[in-house]
Image (cartoon, helix red, strand yellow):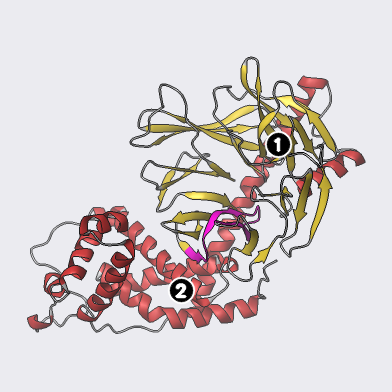
């Protein structure tokens, strides 16, 4: 597990970061907003946000990249605020920051700077940053490779930094004050989450009692017996899977009607099984004690995504230029939220729903657009924010996302890219606590785990590529095509468990959070 530095050591490291990153961040802010006082405020805010997420950042390089992205996001938010939108034109332009007012020769024109670039570099910069084309579109237009686009862009930007460099007097940072501001941000975020969690726990407890009484006269909110505790602990450790239509969860094997489950979504209450009956698709909550409760989720729902830390699932219904997010409480069997999200270009296919991925993480749900961007939806308030990348996996505000030809770790609340994941992976899946990644190598289907913050990658020998996280942070998956399931810790220690099946025949194990569409 990642080691969290003690407070004194953490603050010392942060102070070092502030002094190292401050000059470059301040110059960037001055060029962005052309106001010294505002630039200083923005850099302080960006570094405070960096401190508030310091437990997820393990090296100085990643911290500086995080702070730079936080600065850009904070600046963008500032431009969008009413104070900027309500600015009025004046008779005279304000004096340019950092350029002597009495020396016009030193007022460098961007066009003149561009003219100093080589023709191909100039073309790449204009297409990428003026016409806002992607790397691939720029490469196609110029008839060159994407690698050439990237190298020419890098060289051009290095040259422009020299040509457009201005003298800026950099003030001394108040590193201790910034750390204090960051601690206040973190405290407010934790207190808010705790209050909301207490409200949700209270609501779920009442819902559980009502549902239990209505179904069988017993209270599902009552303390479980020892056998139920054992099953719950086994579920937390081993997750759940389905073999030949039979669901294994906790210490129990459960038969579902129809053709058996083809998808299991983990929640805090158990798994939501999706299965086929004579009447179509149906959903049921299968609990660790072996209980099965039919759910009122509409049968037309393509699939659902579960939140392993809460009794909630979510799904998306496709419409014309919009999608509708639904959030369902599986304990009380009722809909909690319905949010319409604009999605230009989205259409049902032949009048039928399509499978559109959605990730549910606490109060937020994450889905994508036709352009490959991400949307973060607060399903409590209906607030929608844009993310630069589409998260493929989100847990505890940490996301893994695909950025071109590689994977990155991203702050799911701000869209800030924290670091690039080395190597070529088919998939990257975040652990329930947001601290680890399951990585599946593209060529050989090798499964490894790696800290979200970066560090040593541990290969998990024997486990298949369809591996999932259990609620306690173990990796669970089938051993090849054998009737065995492997459970591994992030340290690489593994144990086996047999499943129904003939060792001499092919056995297909569907682990939780994988959808079988075959």
Q: Residues within 10 Å of mark 1 (few under 14, many from 20)?
A: many
The structure residue drawn at horizontal position 37% and vertical position 68%, both measured from the top left corner, is: 42
The structure residue drawn at horizontal position 58% and vertical position 72%, both measured from the top left corner, is: 58
Compared across the picture, whether 96 is left or right of 267 comes to: left
The magenta stretch is: 418-442
From the viewer's side, name the closer residue of 78 and 124: 124
The structure residue drawn at horizontal position 72% and vertical position 50%, both measured from the top left corner, is: 476
In the rendered view, tell whether residue 270 sits above or below residue 79: above
From the viewer's side, name the closer residue of 486 and 157: 486
Where does residue 466 sit, x and y in percent of width and height? Answer: 64, 47
Question: Which disc number belongs to residue 83?
Answer: none
> In the rendered structure, does residue 18 fall within the stretch colored magenta?
no
Q: Which residue is mark 2?
A: 64
In the rendered view, tell whether residue 81 sits above or below residue 180: above
> In the rendered structure, does residue 426 fall within the stretch colored magenta?
yes
Does label 2 or label 1 sit earlier along the sequence?
2
SS for tag 1? strand
Where does residue 412 sit, x and y in percent of width and height? Answer: 50, 54
Q: Quadrant of the C terminus?
A: top right
Where does residue 418 sit, x and y in percent of width and height? Answer: 49, 65
From the viewer's side, name the closer residue of 30 and 153: 153
> Which residue extends farthest front?
504
Compared across the picture, whether 351 is left or right of 296 comes to: left
In the rendered view, tell whether residue 100 sits above or below residue 144: below
From the viewer's side, name the closer residue of 68 and 202: 68
Q: Name the main secondary structure of what is drawn in magenta.
A: strand
Q: Which residue is mark 1?
A: 271
């Amino acid at each position: 597990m990642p080691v969290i530095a003690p407070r004194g050591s953490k603050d010392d490291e942060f102070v070092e970061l502030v002094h190292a990153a401050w000059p470059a961040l301040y110059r960037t802010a001055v060029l962005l907003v052309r106001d010294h006082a505002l630039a200083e405020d923005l850099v302080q805010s960006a570094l405070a946000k960096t401190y508030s997420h310091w437990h997820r950042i393990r090296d100085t390089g990643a911290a500086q990249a995080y702070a730079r992205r936080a600065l850009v996001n904070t600046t963008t938010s500032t431009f969008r605020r009413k104070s900027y939108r309500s600015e009025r034109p004046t008779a005279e332009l304000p004096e340019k920051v950092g350029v002597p007012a009495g020396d016009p020769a030193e007022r460098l024109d961007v066009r003149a700077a561009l003219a100093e670039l080589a023709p191909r570099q100039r073309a790449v910069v204009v297409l990428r940053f003026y016409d806002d084309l992607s790397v691939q579109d720029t490469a196609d237009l110029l008839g060159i490779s994407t690698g050439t686009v990237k190298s020419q862009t890098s060289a051009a930007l290095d040259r422009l930094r020299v040509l457009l460099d201005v003298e800026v007097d950099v003030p001394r940072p108040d590193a201790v004050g910034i750390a204090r501001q960051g601690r206040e941000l973190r405290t407010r975020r934790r207190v808010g989450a705790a209050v909301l969690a207490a409200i949700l726990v209270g609501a779920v407890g009442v819902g559980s009692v009502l549902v239990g009484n209505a179904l069988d006269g017993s209270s599902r909110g009552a303390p479980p017996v020892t056998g139920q505790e054992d099953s719950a602990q086994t579920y937390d450790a081993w997750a759940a899977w389905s073999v030949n239509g039979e669901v294994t969860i906790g210490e129990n094997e459960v038969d579902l009607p129809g053709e058996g489950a083809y998808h299991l979504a983990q929640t805090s209450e158990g798994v939501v099984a999706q299965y086929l009956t004579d009447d179509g698709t149906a959903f049921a909550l299968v609990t660790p004690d072996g209980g099965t409760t039919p759910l009122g989720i509409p049968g037309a729902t393509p699939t659902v995504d579960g939140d392993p830390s809460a009794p909630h699932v979510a799904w998306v219904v496709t419409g014309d230029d919009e999608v509708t997010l639904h959030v369902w409480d599986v304990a009380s069997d009722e809909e909690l939220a319905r949010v319409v999200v604009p999605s230009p270009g989205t259409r049902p296919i032949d009048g039928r729903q399509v499978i559109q991925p959605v990730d549910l993480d606490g109060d937020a749900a994450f889905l994508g657009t036709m352009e490959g961007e991400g949307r973060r939806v607060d399903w409590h308030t209906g607030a929608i924010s844009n993310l630069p990348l589409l998260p493929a996996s989100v847990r505890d505000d940490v996301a893994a996302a695909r950025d071109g030809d590689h994977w990155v770790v991203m702050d799911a609340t701000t869209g800030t890219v924290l670091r690039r994941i080395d190597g070529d992976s088919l998939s990257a899946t975040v652990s329930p606590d947001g601290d680890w990644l399951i990585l599946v190598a593209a060529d050989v289907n090798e499964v490894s785990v790696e800290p979200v913050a970066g560090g040593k990658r541990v290969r998990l020998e024997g486990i298949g590529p369809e591996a999932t996280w259990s609620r306690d942070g173990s990796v669970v998956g089938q051993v090849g095509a054998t009737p065995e399931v492997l459970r591994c810790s992030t340290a690489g220690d593994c144990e086996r468990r047999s499943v129904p099946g003939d060792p001499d025949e092919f056995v297909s194990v569907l682990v939780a959070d994988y959808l079988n569409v075959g």
